[in-house]
Image (cartoon, rainbow, N blue to C red):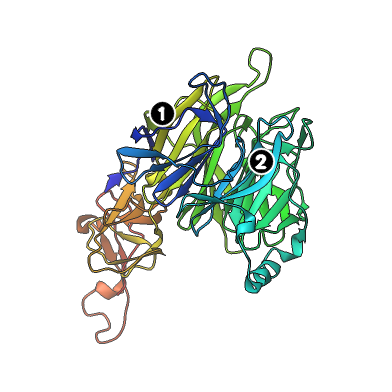
Amino acid sequence: MKQQSPTKIRWETPKCIGEIPPKRSGHSFTLCGSFAYLFGGCVSPRSGKLPGPTNDLFKVDMGSDTEYYWNKVTEQNTILPCSRWHHSANAVGDGRIIIFGGFSSSKTQKYLNDIWILDTKTDKWLLPCDFKSSDEEKNDEINCTWNKGLKRQEPPPPRGSHSACIIDNFLIIFGGYGGSGYSRRDFNDMFALCLKTFVWFTVNTNGNPPCARSAHKCVHAKEKIYVMGGWDTSEQFDDVFVLDKSTLSWSKIESASGPESWGPRRWNFSAVSVFAVPYWKIFVFGGNSGNLDQSRPQGYFRNDIQVLECIFKDDNTAQTSWSRPPVVGNIPSPRSDTEMIYSSDTGKLILFGGWSNKWFGDINCCDVKEVVGPPYNVFSIQSLEWESAIGPVTGNSQMILKGKGFKSSCTTSATIRFACMKGSLEVEVKLKLSSQPYSNGVAKFSYFAVTDARKTLAFGPGILPGIAPFHPTSFIIQAKDRFSNDRTFFNHR
């Protein structure tokens, strides 16, 4: 039996080789299998060039734990996305990456609202017009679960610094700022792009929506969309809102908002949602925070990690709370305008580049396997000898461990850990299958000390000789353990 210790996360910096990208910020960084694609951003001055947006494309092979191989993707198209930054890039399960919007350096069109598709199977750029939708796909568009809240419309107003996520074959866009010309307007509207027909819809929501904002994050977890943080022209935010997909209703999560929960107001941060059986976790890293003044027009830069724990109940409501696991290792420098991805194969968060009054071009990995847990979890433990999750401290009792994600295999080895604080008989049970980490969830279990016969007393008529032979009678046993504590659990079988 081991003592329980806080779960730590560890930062590390892998070695990078190959065609390493120039330093940049406001780029996109998107995972597809064991590769991540880096597109656009505002690059640092290089080879006599001034800093500004770019449209270069790199991919990094993360198949090795210790060495990442970068490769610049050579443009084979005659038509390419224009240079941009603060755009969005989201991966679809079929190997496509969908690019939307952003800011350009054009004197005629600063804000963008175009769609580009990167086919990662061929590393070629495509346009929506390159896809022809079938009648079946058009029917899917009409019959989707969002149809009551969707209304066909033209593409969203041009914008950047928005956020996007994928849900039900739709690209969801929320907020950002843009408008016509060089004027600035912050948005709190929501749009959905059908990824089968490439038709745009407005999403007509209700409830208490987030106010207009940019530099926030929007992530998808189960049947909900979470919007958090950000800023507008006058204030910064420390709030978390959730949109229920089934009702299209917004609500503010008071328990996750405010300085005591969310922490300091934050914008230009990165966030990613991760399925941790059977719940979800949203990791938030870095960004800007603090008050803005002439001495610090961008506030302070951060390099901390916090985790929003989302526990979904049977009625689809969620219990949310923030946690801040201890961090060790080679922690990245504080920064904003970076992008972060999560690899379920390695259990690592990976980020590239960013800005902190200078550009960054490093890649950093954070091992969060112990926080996320393996693709299985334990819910409860039941004794075959006792009526509840208890057992004698001497062991040798048969138990049934219940959970989710278990797969039978004659080659799978199982390790069960009983962990507690020193001296406690109340323990937490975790499971480890083969080389996977221990389960993220725990089952509660209690030990009890066995009876010490020297301190145990039996009394009553049933123990007297010659009393009512051959007839049922009774007597009482007052059992105590070696600490003279009364026994409270007995096996009557």
Q: Position of residue 60 (x, y in %)?
A: 40, 41
Q: Is residue 360 above or below residue 445?
A: above
Q: Is residue 481 above or below residue 471?
A: above
Write down the quadrant of residue 460 in the picture. Answer: bottom left
Q: Position of residue 307 (x, y in %)?
A: 51, 41
**Horizontal relation, residue 108 to residue 354: left or right:** right
Regarding residue 21, the answer to whether it shows in the image is yes
Q: Amino acid at mark 1?
A: Ile
**Horizontal relation, residue 162 to residue 188: left or right:** left
**Horizontal relation, residue 99 to residue 474: left or right:** right
Q: Position of residue 486 (x, y in %)?
A: 33, 55
The residue carrying mark 2 is 162
Evaluate if marks 1 and 2 touch, with contact meaning CB atoms under 8 Å apart. no
Regarding residue 176, the answer to whether it shows in the image is no
Q: Secondary structure at mark 1?
A: loop
* Residue drawn at point x = 48 percent, y = 26 percent: 360
| Label 1 vs label 2, nearer the camera | 2
Q: Position of residue 336 (x, y in %)?
A: 55, 29
Q: Amino acid at mark 2?
A: His
Write down the quadrant of residue 140 in the picture. Answer: bottom right
Work out whether residue 446 or residue 122 is closer to the camera in this orientation and state it.
122
The residue most toward the top is: 295
Q: Which mark is residue 9?
A: none
Q: Is residue 338 above or below residue 250?
A: above
Q: Secondary structure at mark 2?
A: loop
The residue carrying mark 1 is 331
**Disc 1 to disc 2, C-alpha distance:** 27 Å
Question: Which of marks 2 and 1 precedes in the sequence?
Answer: 2
Work out whether residue 64 or residue 98 is closer to the camera in this orientation and state it.
98
Question: For the C terminus, which image quadrant?
Answer: bottom left
Pointer 2 local density, CA inside 10 Å: few below 14, some 14–19, many at least 20: many
* Residue drawn at point x = 37 percent, y = 28 percent: 330
